[in-house]
Image (tube, rainbow, N blue to C red):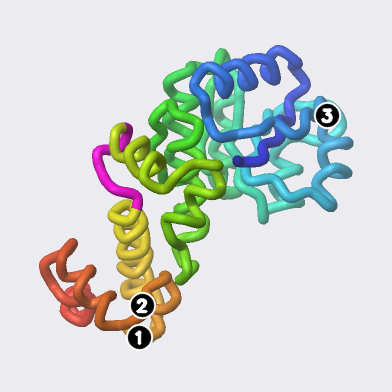
Amino acid sequence: MLSVAIIDDEESVYHIISKIIEMEKLPMSVDAYICDGKHALKLLEDANFDLIFVDIRMPYHSGLEVMETYPEFQYIVITAYNEFEYAQEALRLNAKDILLKPIDRKKFVAAVNRVFNMNLYGNEIVDDLILYLNKNYYQVDLNLTDLANRYFMKASNLCRLFKNHTNQTIMNYLTSQRINRAKDLLQESNMSISEISHSVGFQSETVFYRKFKELNHITPSTYRKSL
């Protein structure tokens, strides 16, 4: 479950976001609501939120000041249309997305999907599992039994539920996440292919080569040379 904070001096924004999360069954928990920049700066000193929704204009300190002070968090900026010029500065500060008030439900869900690079299916268990796999794909010992135990289910029932909603198996989804991350590392790093294979969760380089070629029709080394 994603831990979320909302920083906005309009309490209605807190209620709207909370309602959308509930209606869309998003794997998110609103763990803090702050109505001004001063308290926001204090709260974030020792906080650990996965995502922060922040307004730009607030009492004491602006949302931009909050973002500049704590750049390590992921932010979605919420702003009124006549403040949109400030949104350009928010993008410079690495805002993940910008939502205009009044908040549109579909655009809200799309923004969350983009931030966490995931598709949501409206099922609490499936969505939470996708989020868990996206965060923990690198763990070599991930297995169906342990995943099922997280939800107090039999592995066969969890597999069936996941496939009914996503049209793919849990392990195929996990493999695709690992391969996608490996492609990023092949492009962005100087790590060896062996190092990459282990860093994204494969137990052996041989398995990594086979899965990579199955999904991309070329080997990892050929893919790297083509960049």
What kind of residue is marked 1? Ser
Q: Amino acid at mark 2?
A: Ser
193 on left or right of 200: left
From the viewer's side, name the closer residue of 98 and 112: 112
Helix, strand or loop under label 1 = helix
Identity of the residue furthest to the left in this view: 217
| Element marked by disc 3 | loop
Of 168 and 68, nearer the camera is 168
Label located before the other in sequence (3 or 1): 3
Q: Residue 131 location in percent, x, y?
A: 49, 46
- Say whether disc 2 or disc 3 marks the residue closer to the N-terminus: 3
Q: Is residue 216 magenta?
A: no
Compute the Cα span from label 2 to label 1. 5 Å
Q: Which residue is tagged 2?
A: 197
Q: Is residue 124 above or below residue 176?
A: above
Between label 2 and label 3, give the one nearer the viewer. 2
Q: Which residue is mark 1?
A: 194
Which residue is disc 3 drawn over? 36
Residue, x 54% and y 38% (percent of image)?
A: 88
